[in-house]
Image (cartoon, grey):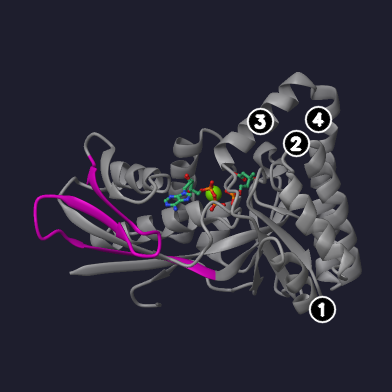
Amino acid sequence: MESVASAPGKTILFGEHSVVYSEPAIAGAVNKRATVKIRRSRNQNTILKSKDLNFEAILDTRKESYSLKHGKPGIIRYILNALSKFHDHTPIEILLSINIPIGSGLGSSAAVTVATLAALFDYHDIPFTKESLAQDAYNVELDVQGMASPLDTIVSTYGGLIYLSREKKPISFTNHINSNFVIGFTTKYGNTGKMVKNVKNLKDAYPNIINPIIEDMGFIANEARIAILKNDISKVGELMNINQGLLDSLGVNTSELSRMIYLARKNGALGSKITGSGGGGSIIALCPHNPDKVMKAINRYDNTLKIKFSKDGVLTKDSI
Ligand SMILES: Nc1ncnc2c1ncn2[C@@H]1O[C@H](COP(=O)(O)OP(=O)(O)O)[C@@H](O)[C@H]1O
Ligand SMILES: C[C@@](O)(CCOP(=O)(O)O)CC(=O)O
Ligand SMILES: [Mg+2]
């Protein structure tokens, strides 16, 4: 028997970092996904393979350790943690396919975690709801990263464009923003755990300065929610730019991200900002009229993706 599940990456429009301190945020699932297949192993080893990431590893689920045949290890920790919580240590083969740029602020870790858990639950016939899956996936991200908000795993599970309230309640928008978005990403990867820790250190060192900045980010997300509901695109862009200024003040910007942000604005984007944890990774630009011009400008130095928001969250065997 083979179990399969897939889950989308995400882009954060408003509220990365501040969401870790329970401020509201807005993020949407995108049309890039991670798919995990699980089947019984043909030998005594538990094997993890990904052609897309060019890696192969043998996992020791009891010791939560691995030996890597080739490839980079990072994402394995999320899969091992999920297995340690919900797998009975019998040998399995796990195949991961992914077209989300990894480590780029587009939520590959959450998508891999959600897809792994959903495939594992199917494999073991463990019943789950979207609510319980999002919570289990959040616990994995928390264990691996040390600090995390539930935003990425919620969006990856439910799909669509979501406003996450202060009380951590996901509220889906019925209207998607009717416009084009461009993602620019560098080959300099960020590390979510490290960036979240850096922000915490800054907050601890300067609480009187940083706490109001984080609170302001929450006000921006709330203003943005109203602007999105009214489909007021220029206001959404303006709020993205304000949010970017505050992210910069938290120390998560880099020269490459700044270059993409300003190239996007110079070429007509209504708003542009980091998306995800920063320190490398991605920016998002709101380009209603000229996405191709913005992409061409960014492509001179970095890479781009035109993304669409996707209503699909986690998909399992019957729905894929
Ligand atoms: N080529 C790769 N192969 C396997 N893991 C990778 C690779 N590049 C990055 N990683 C790991 O993938 C994870 C990405 O998670 P994260 O930093 O949260 O970024 P995001 O979720 O935005 O993609 C990190 O643990 C990182 O070490
Ligand atoms: C910085 C943060 O708000 C978003 C991180 O997103 P990503 O892992 O860089 O895609 C952290 C979190 O919400 O857990
Ligand atoms: Mg992540």
The type of residue carrying mark 4 is Ile
* Prevalent SS, magenta region: strand
Within 10 Å of disc 4 (Cα), the crowding (few <14, some 14-19, many 20+) is: some
The type of residue carrying mark 2 is Gly
Q: Nearer the viewer, mark 1 or mark 3?
A: 1
- Separation of disc 3 and disc 2 at Cα? 8 Å
In terms of depth relative to the viewer, which is nearer, 239 or 299? 299
Q: Residue at x 72, y 50 (%)?
A: 256
Query: What SS does tag 1 mark?
Result: loop
The quadrant the N terminus occupies is: bottom left
In contact (CB < 8 Å): disc 3 and disc 2:
yes
Query: Residue 142: image x %, image y %?
Result: 49, 38
Within 10 Å of disc 2 (Cα), the crowding (few <14, some 14-19, many 20+) is: some
Vertical arrangement, residue 241 with respect to residue 229, above or below: above
Quickly name the residue at label 1: 290
Q: Residue at x 39, y 48 (%)?
A: 72
The quadrant the C terminus occupies is: bottom left
Which dot marks residue 210? 4
Q: Residue at x 70, y 50 (%)?
A: 165
- Separation of disc 1 and disc 3 at Cα? 35 Å
Q: Earlier in the sequence, mark 1 or mark 2?
A: 2
In contact (CB < 8 Å): disc 1 and disc 3:
no
Stretch in magenta: 32-61
- Separation of disc 4 and disc 3 at Cα? 12 Å
Residue 37 colored in magenta in the image: yes
Tell which residue pokes out farthest to the left in this image. Answer: 43
Tell me if 71 is positioned left or right of 99 in this view: left
Mark 3 CB lies closer than 8 A to ligand 2: no
Which dot marks residue 198? 3
Q: Is residue 148 visible?
A: no
